[in-house]
Image (spheres, grey):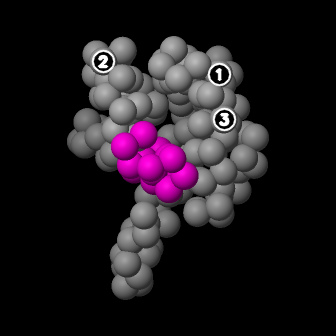
């Protein structure tokens, strides 16, 4: 069962990242970044996103350079706006850019909040937003 739970977190992380980047930079950008990150990590980059946010961020920096910070801020802002979470944008951004060992746990907490919100939308008959 934990593998299924982890897979859900990875999928949600991918969708959150994809929605944020696609809305602002286009779907092609997300596909290209994901391809290069998968090549760099040798596995699904969203596993890295959840399991080791700082490693994901460093990989992103290797792929797109200094634009990584702006991209992570874009994703954090998108999360804050779309899900109205009780996290400051700067705190979400810091989950990726710091080497705090608790970052992965805090990111998982944030993803669980997003999952709960999406489940509530489905239960209440609201279509899932992208």
In depth, the one of 103 and 21 nearer the eye is 21
Residue linked to disc 3: 70
Q: What stretch is highlighted in magenta?
A: 12-29
User: Circles 3 and 2: CB distance less than 8 Å?
Assistant: no
Q: On screen, 97 above or below 76?
A: above
Which residue appears farthest toward the bottom when viewing the image?
A: 125
Rendering coords of residue 32 (x, y %)? 36, 33
User: Circles 1 and 2: CB distance less than 8 Å?
Assistant: no
Question: What type of secondary structure mainly makes up the magenta span?
Answer: helix
Q: On screen, 88 above or below 83?
A: above
Local packing at callout 3 (Cα closer than 10 Å; few below 14, some 14-19, many 20+) is few
Q: How far apart are marks 3 and 2 (CA)?
A: 22 Å
In depth, the one of 126 and 120 nearer the eye is 126
Say if residue 68 shows up in the picture.
Answer: yes
Rendering coords of residue 60 (x, y %)? 51, 23
Q: Can you tell which mark lies on residue 66?
A: 1
User: Circles 1 and 3: CB distance less than 8 Å?
Assistant: yes
Q: Which residue is drawn at 60% across and 54% down?
A: 78
Local packing at callout 1 (Cα closer than 10 Å; few below 14, some 14-19, many 20+) is few
Rendering coords of residue 126 (x, y %)? 41, 82
Q: Which of marks 1 and 2 is in front?
A: 1
SS at mark 2 in the image: helix
Residue linked to disc 2: 39
Q: In which quarter of the image is the C terminus?
A: bottom left
Q: Residue at x 55, y 34 (%)?
A: 105
Rendering coords of residue 15 (x, y %)? 39, 50
| Disc on the earlier residue, 1 or 2 | 2
Q: Residue at x 75, y 49 (%)?
A: 88
């Amino acid at each position: 069962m934990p593998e299924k739970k982890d897979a859900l977190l990875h999928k949600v992380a991918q969708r959150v990242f994809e929605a944020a980047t696609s809305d602002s930079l286009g779907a092609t950008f997300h596909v290209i970044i994901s391809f290069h990150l998968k090549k760099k990590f040798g596995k699904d980059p969203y596993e890295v996103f959840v399991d080791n946010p700082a490693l994901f961020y460093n990989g992103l920096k290797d792929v797109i350079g200094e634009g990584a910070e702006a991209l992570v801020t874009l994703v954090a802002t998108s999360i804050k706006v779309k899900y109205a979470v009780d996290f400051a944008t700067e705190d979400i951004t810091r989950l990726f850019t710091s080497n705090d060992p608790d970052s992965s746990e805090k990111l998982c907490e944030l993803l669980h909040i997003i999952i709960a919100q999406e489940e509530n939308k489905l239960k209440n008959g609201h279509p899932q937003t992208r």
